[in-house]
Amino acid sequence: MDITLQDIKAARDRIQGIAVQTPLKPAYSLTERTGRNIWLKMETMQPTGAFKLRGAANAIMQLSPEQKQAGVLTMSTGNHGKAIAYVAKKLGIRAVICISAQVPEVKIQGMKKLGVEVRVAGKDQDEADIEARSMAQSEGLFFISAFDSAGVIAGQGTVALEVLEQEPSIDTMIIPLSGGGLMAGMAIAAKNIKPGIRLVGVSMEQGAAMHLSIQAGQLVTVDEQPSLADALTGGIPADNQFSFPLCQQYVDRSFLVSEASIAKAMAYALRWERIVLEGGAATSIACLEEYLDEIPGQNIALICTGDNVAVPKLLDIYHQHYAEKDTRS
């Protein structure tokens, strides 16, 4: 089954009223710092605080009445689960979210507040994914992958439609890379609308499953390790249908950034751009800072994927980098 630009355009119409069009914010500080024209795609302003709402809404709204009646189940690091929970509550259907023991408490509470059942199903995402699929089958629930679903990928692709409508001069996008659903959807849209555009993926240094798989030319197994970029951790199941081949086809470059670079980017975003970014979202800024000389393009969009980070944690990171009180108005 191919996923087309028309599927992505149809997804945009379908998810109106659930997901919102987010601003493309000029990043004046980063522009001055880098000598490039930088914009931030503010997916942090989705109702759930992350881009995942687009794909979740598109996937659920395409289910049959019988599937909606039965309910849905997913495995998530938090943002996808929260998105599924939000859509399910809005449509009045049952949702069960399986997570691993490594998911931060702030994301667990965000899901529970939406009234869904949250189950810890393994020590890491690989175990949680296996358990989630088994639960879905045994309980008659429809399983929705966080990144390897045609509906999810088409929904995520709507981000690229908006970016290129908001600023047609964009010639490079830096996109956080995990299971590849966001990259795959955005790539289909962007490369069909503007074939010369460059797509840059970024992941954390440890356990970057899609980055390593692209390099190896086949899916590889990784050890999931704790990271500030918790939204990007976890493996890619062997039965992957869509996201890996699409990322293989479309990703122009892929980089890894350190935990120190991610923390610095989170603090920088808060102080100089006045935005809250979780670790996975801050990787786009970290990539720009760390690999500026290797990144093509003069007009660059950074996809700020989510803001679901515990405030005390973010403030600790901020104060580690900016010990003095910021007295600027």
Image (tube, grey):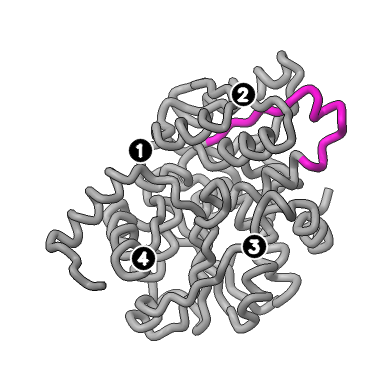
Label 2: which residue?
A: 132
**Looking at the image, do the residues carrying marks 2 and 3 touch, with CB atoms under 8 Å apart?**
no
Tag 3, which secondary structure?
Answer: loop
Closer to us: 33 or 234: 33
Residue 38 shown left or right of residue 46 in the figure: left
| Label 3 vs label 1, nearer the camera | 3
Residue 274's disc is 4
Q: What percent of the width, then of the height, locates residue 286?
A: 37, 63
Pointer 3 or 1: first along the chain:
3
Residue 21's disc is 3
Closer to us: 47 or 57: 47
Label 1: which residue?
A: 226
Alpha carbon distance from label 4 to label 3: 20 Å
Alpha carbon distance from label 2 to label 1: 21 Å
In the image, is residue 75 part of the stretch drawn in magenta? yes
Q: What percent of the width, then of the height, locates residue 328?
A: 22, 72
Q: What amino acid is found at the position of numbered circle 3 in the picture?
A: Gln
**Looking at the image, do the residues carrying marks 1 and 4 touch, with CB atoms under 8 Å apart?**
no
Q: What percent of the width, then of the height, locates residue 291?
A: 38, 70
Q: What amino acid is found at the position of numbered circle 1 in the picture?
A: Pro
Does 280 appear above or below 97? below
Pointer 1 or 4: first along the chain:
1
Alpha carbon distance from label 2 to label 3: 31 Å
Q: Tell me the crowding category of disc 1: few under 14, some 14 to 19, or many 20 or more residues within 10 angstroms, Cα based.
A: some
User: Going by the picture, which residue comes out furthest to the left?
Assistant: 324
Residue 244 seen in this snapshot: no
